[in-house]
Image (cartoon, rainbow, N blue to C red):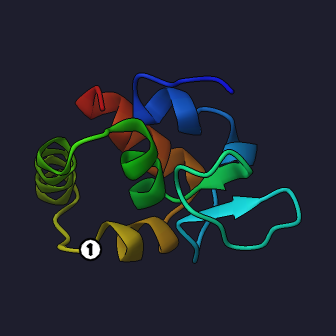
Amino acid sequence: MTEYKTVYELLEDPNRWCKQYMALNSKLNPTGCRNEDAICWCGMGAIIKVYKTQDEIDKIIDKVCKEVGHRSITYWNDCNSHNNVYNVFKKLGI
């Protein structure tokens, strides 16, 4: 299983990104963000997968929310394209 250091590395491939669920398995059923069977993640799910501590996760959430002008990363993720989501994470170096 590949370990990604940033969310943008994880979500670089559009096939590893999803909407409406934090993470999906190969049967496209919801699964845990850190489960080994996860194959794609929403922006929030990717943050939880990549960053291990709640303190890190909270700081990343604050950074992204300030950048996109929205209080919910999941809502923002679901209302955008892969390209828009990926570019925000890449711009922020997250």
Left or right of residue 34: residue 26: right
Q: Residue at x 32, y 38 (%)?
A: 51
Q: Can you say whether 74 is above or below 90 in the image?
A: below
On-image quarter of the N terminus: top right
Which residue is more in the foreground, 43 or 51?
A: 51
Which residue is more in the foreground, 15 or 87?
A: 15
Kind of residue at badge 1: Ser
Left or right of residue 66: residue 18: right
Which residue is more in the foreground, 5 or 86?
A: 5
Q: Residue at x 18, y 51 (%)?
A: 54
Q: Secondary structure at mark 1?
A: loop
Q: Position of residue 45 (x, y in %)?
A: 46, 57
- The picture quadrant where one finds residue 41 is bottom right
Instruction: Mark 1: give few (<14), some (14-19) or many (20+) Cα within 10 Å.
Output: some
Q: Which residue is mark 1?
A: 72
Q: Position of residue 73 (x, y in %)?
A: 32, 66
Q: Position of residue 61 (x, y in %)?
A: 20, 55
Left or right of residue 21: residue 79: left
Q: Residue at x 70, y 63 (%)?
A: 24
